Amino acid sequence: MKIEVITHPSGDQLPILVDDNGLPIPTPNEFIIGRRNLSTNTLIRNLRELSVFYSWLLHEKVDLWKRIKTGQSFSEAEIRRSMIEALRRDQNTDRKISRITISPYTFNQRLTTVRQFLSWCFGMHLSSLPLSDQSYDRIREQQKRLLKWLDSSFLNAPPSNKGKNKGLTDKQASFLIHCLNPDNSEAIGRNPAVRFRNYISIMIMLYYGLKPGELLSLRVEDIEIGAISSIRIVRRPPDRQDTRKPRPQIKRNGRVMPIDDSLFAKRLDEYIMNWRDILESDSTNSTEYLILSDEGNPLTQSALTQFYQHLRNKFPEQLPSHFSAKALRHTFSSMMERILRSAELNQDRRKQALALLRGDSSLNSQSVYIAQEIEEQASQALKHFQSMLLAYR
């Protein structure tokens, strides 16, 4: 059982679940087609989660539709002692040391998808029955009972400190900029074009809090250098010419980010006019994407991830172990929250501003950065209080 990603002529990508013979498994694929408004990566994750459930069905020799149509469905023992335990097992066989169970968060994701799938299956069958069918009420009751068992099986994740700093400190951010500065003779990169590419990539993410998919989706036309310089994050239809797997996507709202740093604007213009062309000359295909690989092709997500890992390994004392694209976005958000607070904006206005800058539709996701800033202020107040006590000695 594996997942295949089908690229349609329109450029849209749709994953499907196939059996060991390479044949599509109808029911989960029909379920996924109904959710095709979601991103390809989300649909792939959903199919991975459903593949665990289908592996359990095969192992237990359970005919899903027969169980649903007869109204007998599943027993509580099958759900709580068998299926739930199967969902908790680690399915990764590539590790040298395998884990017995997965994290509560991963388990809850699996259980959520399986619950949605089973509810959809019951709904599909019930909708095909006439209201006069005597089995309708029995199957409906079995559906409620099954969903109740699943709802009671979710795990409570261990408490986490939402205010914990997941970004970079000011010192770490300063070091990162210095070690990537193309004017620095020790900057990372095998040639000037690569060094400029590295610097531009990281600085865009640090300056504007972009997600990796947003950075890798940028095109040259999205950069405007002039009296009012800016970077445009634009949501576009799928690009049929983009062969990267997975294909970078923009999930957040489009927005225009002004470039107020004249030095960065100058370097960005230099990269586009000079160094990007040098990178592209190594490829047989031309492209409009801004960030290119060493070979002149659009940079992939895996290559970007490997670059973060390379920086962590090269500078273990200067950069934190969690240094990644997510850490840069967190750094941007935390620093912006600090600036917005110093501008004396109230909490609701700060949430709105952060959501606008990050491209978020929800204001709730901004709470973590507000909590972090409050915790840092509380820590500073505590230090001040203790220094006052020391003065009384």
Image (cartoon, grey):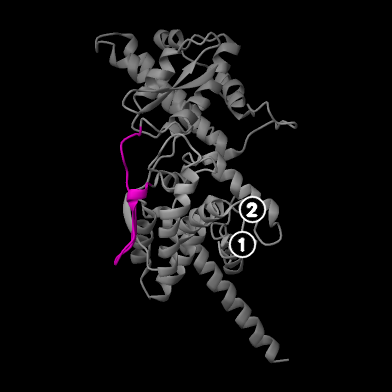
Out of 106 and 234, give the one closest to the viewer: 234
Task: Give residue 258's mark.
Answer: none
Any magenta on residue 42? no
- Amino acid type, label 2: Leu
Tell me if I can see residue 195 in this picture: yes
Label 2 sits on a secondary structure element that is helix
- The reply to whether the C-beta atoms of the residues labelled 1 and 2 are less than 8 Å apart is yes
Q: Quadrant of the C terminus?
A: bottom right
Separation of residues labelled 1 and 2 (CA atoms) = 10 Å
For label 2, count other residues whose C-alpha is less than 10 Å away and answer few (under 14), some (14-19) or many (20+): some
User: How far across and down, in percent of the image, does residue 353 sit?
Assistant: 35, 62
Any magenta on residue 229? yes
* Residue shown at the point (51%, 35%) measured from the top left: 109
The residue stretch that appears in magenta: 219-239
For label 1, count other residues whose C-alpha is less than 10 Å away and answer few (under 14), some (14-19) or many (20+): some
User: How far across and down, in percent of the image, does residue 388 sit?
Assistant: 64, 87
Q: Is residue 327 above or below residue 86?
A: below
User: How far across and down, in percent of the image, does residue 248 sit?
Assistant: 44, 39
Q: Which residue is mark 2?
A: 311
The extreme bottom residue here reads 392
Q: Which residue is mark 1?
A: 179
Q: Is residue 216 left or right of residue 54?
A: left
User: How far across and down, in percent of the image, does residue 363 sit?
Assistant: 37, 55
- Counting residues from the N terminus, which is met first, the one under dot 1 or under dot 2? 1
Q: Quadrant of the N terminus?
A: top right
Q: Is residue 326 above or below residue 4?
A: below
- Amino acid type, label 1: Cys
Tell me if I can see residue 148 in this picture: no
